Image: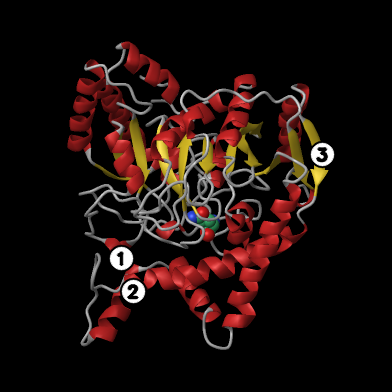
Amino acid sequence: MLVGTAVDWREGLDAGDLSSLALVRASLDRMKRLEGRLHAILAMGEDRSLQLATQADARLRAGERSPVLGLPIVLKDNLHWSGLQVSCGSRILDGYRAPYNATVVQRLLAAGAVPVAKANMDEFAMGSSGEYSAFGPARNPWDTARVPGGSSSGSVVAVSAGYTPLALGSDTGGSVRLPASFCNVTALRPTYGVLSRYGLTAMASSLDQVGPIATSAADIALAFGVMAGLDPMDSTSADLPRADCLAPLRPKNLKGLRIGLPVEYFGDGLESGVRSLLETALQVFADQGAEIREVSLPHTRYAIDTYYLLCTSEVSSNLSRFDGVRYGRRGEGVDLPEMIAETRNQGLGAEVKRRILLGAFCLSKGYYDAFYIKALKARTLIARDFDKVFESVDLLATPVSPGVAFPFGAKTDDPLAMYLADAFTVTAPLAGIPCLSMPAGFTTGLPVGIQLIGPAFSDVMLLETAHAFQSLTRHHLETPPLSA
Ligand code: GLN
């Protein structure tokens, strides 16, 4: 069995000790062996992947070098890879195939990466556990009776279970970081705009970002550098400073690094096992000379309400395009309104419907000022808290989630309990700033992540800091107990 980090595989490919074809075959084999248990994958493009791997090998033999050339990668099923399905985890897109490549996918393909599969996800990226997928949930490789976290459940499971060393997810309010924490992998949510959203099916456009997922920060850097940068197809796209420092990534010197611990994230709700692992992780930074101090982000308490008002408002608008006319499946009806209603009634799941209703309500005449406009104001206050705190610290360290992966069904009857799982992950997206989740150890046999949050465009610094931590620890190299 071939198991390794992307950096290991990169070296093997460049040295001629490995071939892309062998790696891609190994990925596909492992996927087929474990899928019955994990259900991380919704579609494969096997023939095409093998063809791309053969092309990558030819480019390698011709002496070409690129950070991702020949590496297999899994894509969340809301990213367009031309010719393959884009289900977004929903029945409403039955039969819809991507007519073009998302910019991030196009850039990966141009650099020689080999997509191998489309990953399971919560329907339209709405959810925190993976349980809202219309095709049944992915399972956590560390304990298959527990959720892997969502919404990028399949992408994270693919990396955690060793299908591929790299995957792409999307993060609107935590969807790569929460599952990364639950499954012991590393995931970055970049500064808003740094990765193009062109070809990422929109959930809440002012919050959506593509998020790379891998075993380590150094692995993420390989793919991130290839994908980042201005895209004329996305009017909110922005350039990434210091992109040239991503491959190979160097660990940051931690001496004198000022790390803030926001008191609002370390309250009573935090499970004791999580708290003590975070303390141990912070000690690693302190031992290297980092200065750790408490800070406050006073508007954190409004973050969940703000996020769920803005997110649902944007959802209600973005998802109106799924009407049975343009994409995917079509319901029966005697006239157009009835056909549209029937299409949406059959095609969309309960959580998606709940959000469309809530969002339409927030945006409706008479409530717009009271809810939507007020939430926008709260968003500004939350962003200002971060601006202020970054005057005195370089980055923040927080929990990703108050607890470990929960059992299936624990929160599905109570949408509010599910929303509260996002308490620590929705704040940074509201401010548009970068953040990552990386492994910090285990409690009761289950992984726990630590989150780093930095000011806008500090993405490379965050990865360098994570790389320094991962050079000193081994949590990220632990693999789940899967016999195969
Ligand atoms: N769990 C959050 C939600 O349900 C975040 C989802 C996401 O980041 N896509 O909205």
144 or 89, nearer to the observer:
89
Residue 254 pos. (x, y %): 70, 26
Q: Amino acid type of disc 3?
A: Arg
Residue 241 pos. (x, y %): 52, 39
The residue under label 2 is 344
Q: Amino acid type of disc 1?
A: Ile
Q: Looking at the image, is 186 positioned above or below residue 321?
A: above
Point 59% across, 40% down: residue: 458
Horizontal side, residue 64 vs residue 410: left or right: left
76 or 385, nearer to the observer:
385
Judged by depth in the image, the label closer to the viewer, 3 or 2, is 3
Q: Looking at the image, is 387 positioned above or below residue 312?
A: above
In the structure shown, which secondary structural element does the residue marked by tag 1 occupy?
helix
The residue under label 1 is 92
The residue under label 3 is 293
Q: Looking at the image, is 173 positioned above or below residue 295?
A: below
Quadrant in which residue 285 is drawn: top right
Q: Are marks 2 and 1 in contact (CB under 8 Å)?
A: yes
